[in-house]
Amino acid sequence: MECKKINPKKEELEPHALKVCRIYVERGWGLEALKQRWRSHFLETMNPQYLPELWSIEHRPKFKGALIDDCSKEVLKHLENGGKYQGCLKTP
């Protein structure tokens, strides 16, 4: 059996996080569902002892003043262009 070497160019590689975000947006689930799933997994897996009083799985951050699900495609485009989403992003 012969194995082929795969050597993609760096610009052809897509970060895993971006792939996951794209799937959630394209399938209509939205980034809010992804965020809530991740937070739920975090609670179950890590069993944190100290969280801020207002910390919540259901917290709905905004992106440029809109709820994330209302602008999922804009957030995705921002990530594709190398931006790092950090909650309430005020600057382009």
Image (cartoon, rainbow, N blue to C red):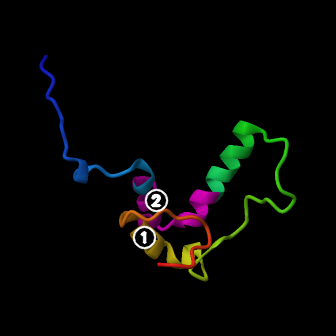
Residue 23 is covered by the magenta coloring: yes
Where is residue 23? Give x, y as percent.
42, 58
Quadrant of residue 81 within the rendered picture:
bottom left
Q: Which mark is residue 91?
A: none
Q: Residue at x 12, y 20 (%)?
A: 2
Residue at image coords 61%, 83%:
65
The region drawn magenta spans: 19-35
* Image coords of residue 30 (percent x, y): 53, 67
Question: Furthest residue to the right?
Answer: 53
Q: Is the residue 24 above or below the residue 90 in the image?
A: above
What amino acid is labelled 2 in the image? Answer: Cys
| Amino acid marked by disc 1 | His
Residue found 57% across the figure and 79% down from its top: 90
Relative to residue 64, is residue 74 drawn left or right?
Answer: left
User: Can you say whether 67 is above or below 48 in the image?
Assistant: below
Q: Position of residue 37 (x, y in %)?
A: 63, 53
Label 1, label 2: how far apart the Cα atoms are = 11 Å
- Residue 8 against residue 71 in the figure, above or below: above
Prevailing secondary structure class for the magenta stretch in the rendered image: helix
How many residues crowd mark 2 within 10 Å: few (<14), some (14–19), many (20+)? many
Q: Residue furthest top?
A: 1
Image mark for residue 21: 2
Q: Disc 1 marks which residue?
A: 78
Please state, as top left, top right, bottom left or bottom right, where the N terminus lies in the image. Answer: top left
SS at mark 1 in the image:
helix
Q: Is residue 82 shown in magenta? A: no
